[in-house]
Amino acid sequence: MLEIVRQQMICIVAPGWPGGGGLPQSLQDALDSLLRDVAVVHFASIGLLPAVADAAEQRPSLMLELAVEEGLRPYDLLYRLIHHPGGAMWSLFGAMVAPGVAVPTAQHEQQLLDKLMQWHSIADGAFVGARDRSVRQIKMEQDLLERTRAEARTLKSKYGNDRTAFALALARWAYADPRFEWAATPAPRSYWRGKGAGIGAKLAYPVAAIVLWFVALWLVSALPRAYNWFFGEPGPIVQAVEDAVSKTSKCLLAISGHGFLAFAVIAFLVWLFLVPLPAQFVSWRRWLNSVQQELDRPTETFSSLSTYVGGWVIGVPLLLAIAACAIAYTFAPLAYALAPDYMARIVEPKIPKLTGLEIIGIAVAVIAVVLCIGALFYWLNRRFTKLSEQFFHPLEDDVPRAQQIHPSVERCEAELVRKTQHMFSLTDVRRPNGWSAWCIRTALRIVTFAGRVFFTQGWLGNAPGIHFGHWHIIDNGRRFLFCSNYDGNFGGYLDDFINGASTGTTLAWRWTELSPRAPAVDGQPGIAAPRSFPPTRFVIFRGVKCELKFKSYARDSMLPHIYHFDACNRTIEQINLATGLRDALFGERNEKNDDLIMRAIET
């Protein structure tokens, strides 16, 4: 499932670019024609990546970014691009494959295809905003939206403020127009973006997996009995195999039961501390918010330092103790299976024997203590108002220098004003490269899964307007490349991540740094002094919350593009609005669809 998303975003990194810092206009026109004819590429960009500092050849790499429709394998996509009669791909990459060949033969094209497959990289993590929409569908729905607005202007004087009659007239007009026969079929939606994929359906998958696992273990444990029922008493060898299978399956079943119960208890405790208690006690809610704020605080104030130290002295040991108890409880059946005498004689006598009533009493006592602590905090907040206000003071930031923007990057952003913006970011993976790359890939798989299953309407966390965002670990795990096509401006784009998806953003970049590097070519940005990603606390805190430090880090990592292609030039909001209008015009007549029609024509 995740590979489908990742394959939608491809980067081809071709080392040893022999050209300069730009592409001839004729080649750009040929690439435009190629991508329009193929009609499966939403966005394409070309940039130059500086050579790795210790590389033998210090020529830049040519990087082609492609954001394509779902369901295309990289080989099929590249085959279409290379065998287009215009020959734009050969004009771009031919000098790096077979220098001096102006008109390629079939053998040369196959050689280029093999090279591009060698150079290509599917995304290690990716997010798609306008899901389940092809280039053709976006264009046709946009045409429907524009024609509906034009028709609405002619009908306005007739229907005035009668929204129901107005919407009905527009729906009749759309039904009668043969140009819109295609729209009578509801807009395609994948399962996760459809109406059936509610919270219950999404939770049904892990629940079904757990149930099937327990059923499979039970069936395996029952196999020896079934065998004996069919074939009678087994011989010594078969009996030994049956005993091994039976013991192993029963042990796994017990471990799975213990593990599931431990996970359920921990999940309940997390839910209890993060949802009901903050809802019931204002002081508890303020304390949780304060802890997060203090851990995100860039300045070394007394409150932030005390929270940080308290996290190490109390929080980390407590979490480790809970994890140790959960692990010990989970694998207790295995210990009994491997060393039953040791567990019975030495370990078991040391474990307190508690009845169910005693366990319930302990749980009630713990809850009562927590409630008392909440009441105590509430009383302290009311009693010492000034001290409370001093501790809960607003977040501050310290900025070492002003944010700098290289003219080449600024020029690229100016070219895309009022269009879909684009960015390249290139950072170095922190040493040890293997460990850091593994951590980044793990974080990116989580982000990709969340975007695929939960954030299906063009929002990643609370960050809207991302068309295609993708991350690649390149150069044998040494560098980290991020490409994004997004709506709005760069400052607002980063603000959305800082304020809404800070945890995922910190996880994606915390294992990176900026090492000194020369510009790819003259006129492009380089890095003179090394820079580190803003420091984090307990893996997920701080980081991007050092707002201006993070923005400066992101700016310094950016590279300009030398070519950019946008098939539709529409915002996420416009794309979703056009799809909604299609479904509302040709769907059942109700107030919701009528309101959506009126909103679409009035926006």
Image (spheres, rainbow, N blue to C red):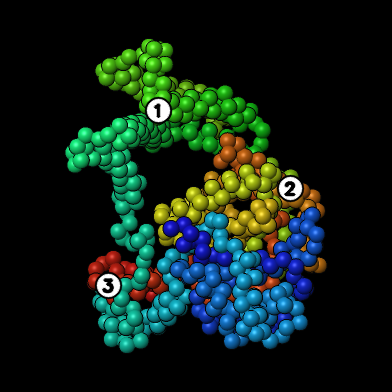
Q: Alpha-carbon neighbours of circle 2 within 10 Å: few (<14), some, or many (≥20)?
A: some
Q: Secondary structure at mark 3?
A: loop
Tell me which numbered mark, 2 or 1, is placed earlier along the sequence.
1
List the residue tagged with mark 1.
Answer: 334
The quadrant in which the N terminus is found is bottom left
List the residue tagged with mark 3.
Answer: 587
Q: Secondary structure at mark 1?
A: helix
Can you give x and y, in whole percent of width and height, for residue 430 in the image? 68, 46
Q: In 3D space, how far apart are the residues under numbered discs 1 and 3 (Cα atoms)?
A: 58 Å
Three-letter residue code for mark 2: Arg
Which label sits in the foreground, 1 or 3?
1
Tell me which numbered mark, 1 or 3, is placed earlier along the sequence.
1
The residue that appears at 39% across and 16% down in the rendered structure is 341
Which of the labelled discs sits on residue 52, or is there none?
none
Q: Alpha-carbon neighbours of circle 1 within 10 Å: few (<14), some, or many (≥20)?
A: some
Marks 3 and 2 close (CB-CB < 8 Å) = no
List the residue tagged with mark 2.
Answer: 531
Can you give x and y, in whole percent of width and height, for residue 241 in the image? 33, 35
Image: 30 above or below 294: below
The residue that appears at 19% across and 37% down in the rendered structure is 232
Q: Secondary structure at mark 2?
A: strand
User: Camera-side residue: 20 or 274?
Assistant: 20
Can you give x and y, in whole percent of width and height, for residue 553 in the image? 69, 51
Residue 385 seen = no
Three-letter residue code for mark 3: Gly
Image: 5 above or below 478: below
